[in-house]
Image (spheres, rainbow, N blue to C red):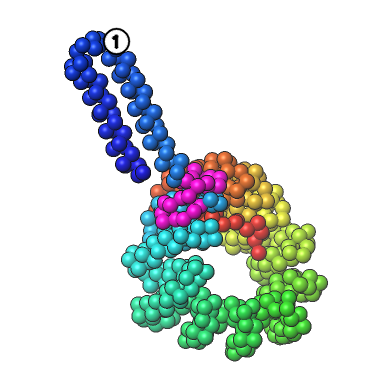
Amino acid sequence: MGQKTAWVLVLGVITLVLAGVWATPRLFPALGWGLNELNQLSGIASLAVAVGALAVTLWPVRSSGVPDAFGTAVGDNDSGGGGGARDVPRHWFEAERMARSITDPYDRADALAEVAEAFVEHDPKRTRALLDEIERIACRSITDPHRRVRTLLKLAEALIPLAPERARALLGEAEHFFRTATRSATDHIFRTPLAEVSRVLARLDPAEAERIARSLTGFDRTWALGDVASVLAVADPAEAERIISSLSRSTDRVGPLARLAGAVAGTDPQHARALLREAQRITRSIPGSNRIGYLATVARVVVEFDPEEARALLEEAEHLARATTHPPRRAEDLVMLARVVAEIDPQHARSLLLEAQRVTGSVKDADIQAEERASLAEVMAGLDLAEAERIARFVNDPYLRAEALEKVAGVAAELDPVGAERIARSIRTQHIDRFVTTFFPRQGEASRPLEYHRALALGRIAGAVADHDPQRARTLLEEAERIARSITAIRDRESVLLDIVRALVRKVPTKVL
């Protein structure tokens, strides 16, 4: 019985009972009912009505299975077109509520896509309903070609395990729309969305994905072909190797060759070593410090199955980094290497970061120094939280300091939730005043309150602890959302809400690599 029907029935019963109480002494005067008798009957009728109303109110709540904000949902939940939700964490529903509150269509679609991907294994029916909604938003509300194509891309990627044919059609629609809505396939600022179309399409139609990639020019073409090869590395290594060999510049082949080697190492270790030898041969032909990044790229893959070989590559890269005379570049290279070294030797990675910290002290440009320290602190957070916090607090610029502390707290969220929360709460909660804005004028951020970063950090911690400490997560989430909704600038406010949604529905990385 529906809730509305039940309420109509209860109101009808109330009317009949009261009418009967009123009519009985008038129709049957011989009963001799006086005021006391009528009061008693009215009391009994009121009790019955109250019990009935309570039952009708509680019954839909019991049967609907709509969950509280945190914990594990029990019962069948049909809200939003969903199916059974017996094993769905309750905070996912809270993430969906928050996603729907975002007003910008592009960001709302992005947030709902994150939620849909979380639901896909637990509740396919609900996932399909969310994806249908995202498609409506993309086609009706998002007019910018780049944004619409990226939304259709995310939608197609989420649909691949559920409806591959529909995903294929959406990718075709995305390509057609972008080519007709822009002056050319290269009408973009940095990287054309068509490169991403080819990457996603490679999972469904490799030949068509390669066609799109080869229709691009310059770096877009190189990136797209490399991405297609990386997708094919597991399913069709020979085809992936053919595409990599077709790249015109040898240096562009290093990364794809290393990823292909990692993909085939388990089934064909000899071929994997041959691929890595080719990647290393190309790398060693690169002069000077430009070789460092390529050595780190190869080492990142080699470390999975040959730690000693990775260690040798990283030692060579370290030697080159220390020979760099430009302090900002040297510090940047040391931080990059520390990310990879942390996989095999955390203590040595920590020493590299401390060395980078000393190098940043000699950087004369205050802005570059602040950015280097903020990046360094984020990597250090996965190795030594106390040292990471100390480095972050040395950042002179208040904007970057707040951002550095937020990132440190985000990395530490699963490793040390208590320490992460303490750091998050230490971020200043007042708006930047005229004095700070005058001496640290960062365009585009001058109106942003520093609690923006506090809300981001608290939201990430809430997502990290939601599974094992729902009550704590609820408190953190409520505070993060309250802070977010107090931010005046809509863009900043919804950026925080989108980030919180992501933290609630997926695992937060415990290290920055």
- The 10 Å Cα crowd at callout 1, few under 14, some 14 to 19, many 20 or more, is few
Q: Is residue 461 left or right of residue 479?
A: right
Predominant secondary structure in magenta? Answer: loop
Q: Quadrant of residue 383?
A: bottom right
Q: Quadrant of the N terminus?
A: top left
Is residue 55 among the parts visible in the rendering?
yes
Foreground: 64 or 266? 64
Amino acid type indicated by mark 1? Asn
Task: Indicate the secondary structure of the residue bearing disc 1.
Answer: helix
Q: Quadrant of residue 182?
A: bottom left
Residue at the spot of label 1: 36
Image height check: is 214 above or below 431?
below
Q: Residue furthest right?
A: 308
Q: Is residue 319 left or right of residue 464?
A: right
Image point (45%, 67%), residue name: 155
Image height check: is 254 above or below 72?
below
Image height check: is 217 above or below 199?
below
Q: Position of residue 64 (x, y in %)?
A: 44, 45
For residue 150: magenta? no
Image point (60%, 48%), residue name: 467
Q: Position of residue 390 (x, y in %)?
A: 67, 50
Q: Quadrant of the C terminus?
A: bottom right
Is residue 291 among the parts visible in the rendering?
no
Image point (40%, 34%), residue name: 55
For residue 76: magenta? yes
Q: Position of residue 89 (x, y in %)?
A: 55, 50
Foreground: 194 or 323? 194
Q: Which residues are magenta?
A: 65-85
